[in-house]
Amino acid sequence: MLALVDNILRAINFCFLVILLGLVGSLLATQSSHSSRVNFCMFAAAFAMVTDSFYGLLANFLEPLAWPIILFVLDFLNFAFTFTAGTVLAVATRTHSCTNTDYLDSNNITQGSTQRCRESQAVTAFFYFSFFIFLAKMILSGLSLLSNGPFSAAGGFSARRRKTAQVGVPTISQV
């Protein structure tokens, strides 16, 4: 079972990712021309949903899936993809006012629509929220990796501490 903090961060991030999937899906459904930036945003949100939420749920119940090295690699990939998606969309929209018609008409992402402009700004914000959660999760999984080893089915930082005394090992009172 994964650590409580990790599961809380996964639950919060799940909410952000569901919102992202809806907003990016809306951007894709209303676009009139192809935009690889919006397509990458959908990939990043879907990849994060599968590898963070669904894999994390499985790792809670199947200990072989909770290896710290796997969790760290997935957290790093999600960290990189969400940062890239948020930055790509922020650069593409250039964060102008959504009421400026000259800006709206000349932008490939907004395509002249105030609603698409606001949706793209919301997508950028939620990608950065998710990015910071993945940063925290990556730090936590890195600490777990360093303290428990890469292939231990560890639930947190103190997984190597023994819950009960070993048989045959003298205690301090016996010495």
Image (cartoon, grey):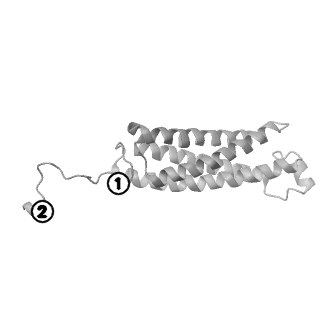
Whichever of labels 2 and 1 marks the residue nearer the N terminus, that label is: 1
> Residue at (77%, 38%) from the top-left corner?
28
The amino acid type of the residue labelled 1 equals Ser
Left/right placement of residue 21 relative to residue 68 reads: right
Vertical side of 24 occupied by 124: above or below: below
Q: Residue furthest left?
A: 175
Q: What x and y, as percent, mark residue 48?
A: 59, 43
**Which mark's residue is nearer the viewer, 2 or 1?**
2
Q: Between 172 and 93, which is closer to the camera in this rendering?
A: 172
Any mark on residue 114, and which?
A: none
The answer for how far apart the CA atoms under marks 2 and 1 are is 26 Å
- The quarter of the displayed image where residue 170 is located: bottom left
**Kind of element beneath mark 2:** helix
Any mark on residue 172, and which?
A: 2
**Kind of element beneath mark 1:** helix
Any mark on residue 147, and which?
A: 1
Q: Between 52 and 31, which is closer to the camera in this rendering?
A: 52
Left/right placement of residue 82 relative to residue 10 reads: right
The amino acid type of the residue labelled 2 equals Ile
Bin the neighbour count of mark 1 within 10 Å (Cα to Cα): few under 14, some 14-19, many 20 and up: some
Q: What x and y, as percent, mark residue 21?
A: 69, 42
Quadrant including the N terminus? top left
Vertical side of 45 occupied by 138: above or below: below
Q: What x and y, as percent, mark residue 140?
A: 45, 55
Quadrant including the C terminus? bottom left
Left/right placement of residue 164 relative to residue 131 reads: left
> Residue at (52%, 48%) from the top-left corner?
76
